[in-house]
Image (cartoon, rainbow, N blue to C red):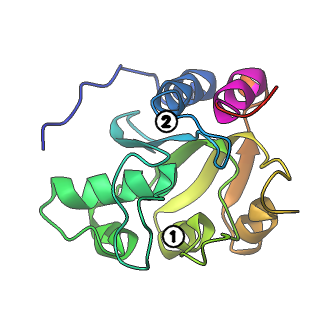
């Protein structure tokens, strides 16, 4: 798989990384039964972009995903695939490949419950908490499908920092709701 060229962004420029996550979210096919979410996995020390992902970018893997891969999950799968590893439970396979200060930018709060019963993004992130210690978020998950997602509470309880990137809220919300009635 050819790796896409990513922009060069200075480490710690949270707005720029989140804007790049919004670019990813806009690649997600719109629909009234899902959110369009984008994610960017970054080496927090160098600013190198390790992978990107967006909702339904990749086919589902096991667990009956049926193509409903979330943006964060796609980031992890793509890291695994770029190293010739199986995409199944990719987050468990990539832990030794990630830099010590890995950072995740996601346009929407990671899910802590899924209507499909598939493994949640919070579960996947927690598996990586030895290296992934902070998640930057554009918006909290609206109560459209899951009431009180509580991904923030779950990640913080696991010792993972949860930081909002407030200046990108409107961009993230607009991208997420693509395909929903206004």
Region in magenta: 169-178
Q: Mark 1 or mark 2, which is nearer the start of the sequence?
A: 2
Q: Nearer the viewer, residue 81 or 133?
A: 81
Judged from the image, the secondary structure of the residue bearing numbered disc 2 is: loop
Judged from the image, the secondary structure of the residue bearing numbered disc 1 is: helix
In the rendered structure, does residue 12 fall within the stretch colored magenta? no
Q: Nearer the viewer, residue 167 or 33?
A: 33
At a point 64% along the width and 44% down the height, the residue shown is 35
Q: How many marks?
A: 2
Q: Which residue is mark 2?
A: 29
At a point 77% along the width and 27% down the height, the residue shown is 169
Q: Which residue is mark 1?
A: 124
Q: Quadrant of residue 32?
A: top right
Name the quadrant of the C terminus: top right
Q: Give coordinates of residue 97: x percent, y percent.
A: 27, 62
Q: Judge from the rendering whether residue 98 lies leftward or rightward of residue 164; answer left or right.
A: left
Q: Main secondary structure of the magenta part?
A: helix
Question: Is residue 43 in sight in this rendering?
Answer: no
| Alpha carbon distance from label 2 to label 1 | 23 Å
Of labels 2 and 1, the one closer to you:
2
At a point 46% along the width and 31% down the height, the residue shown is 24
Q: Quadrant of residue 57?
A: top left
């Amino acid at each position: 798989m050819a790796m896409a060229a990513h922009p060069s962004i200075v480490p710690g420029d949270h707005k720029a990384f989140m804007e790049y996550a919004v670019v990813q979210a806009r690649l997600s096919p719109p629909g009234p039964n899902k959110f369009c979410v984008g994610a960017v996995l970054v080496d927090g020390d160098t600013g190198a972009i390790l992978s990107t992902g967006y909702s339904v970018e990749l086919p589902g893997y096991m667990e009956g995903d049926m193509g409903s891969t979330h943006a964060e999950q796609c980031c992890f799968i793509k890291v695994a695939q770029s190293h010739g590893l199986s995409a199944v439970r990719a987050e468990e396979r990539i832990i030794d490949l990630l830099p010590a200060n890995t950072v995740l930018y996601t346009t929407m709060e990671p899910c802590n419950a899924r209507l499909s019963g598939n493994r949640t993004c919070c579960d996947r992130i927690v598996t990586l908490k030895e290296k992934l210690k902070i998640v930057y978020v554009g918006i909290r998950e609206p109560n459209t499908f899951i009431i009180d997602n509580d991904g923030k509470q779950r990640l913080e309880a696991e010792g993972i920092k949860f930081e909002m990137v407030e200046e990108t809220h409107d961009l993230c919300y607009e991208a997420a709701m693509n395909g929903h009635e206004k």
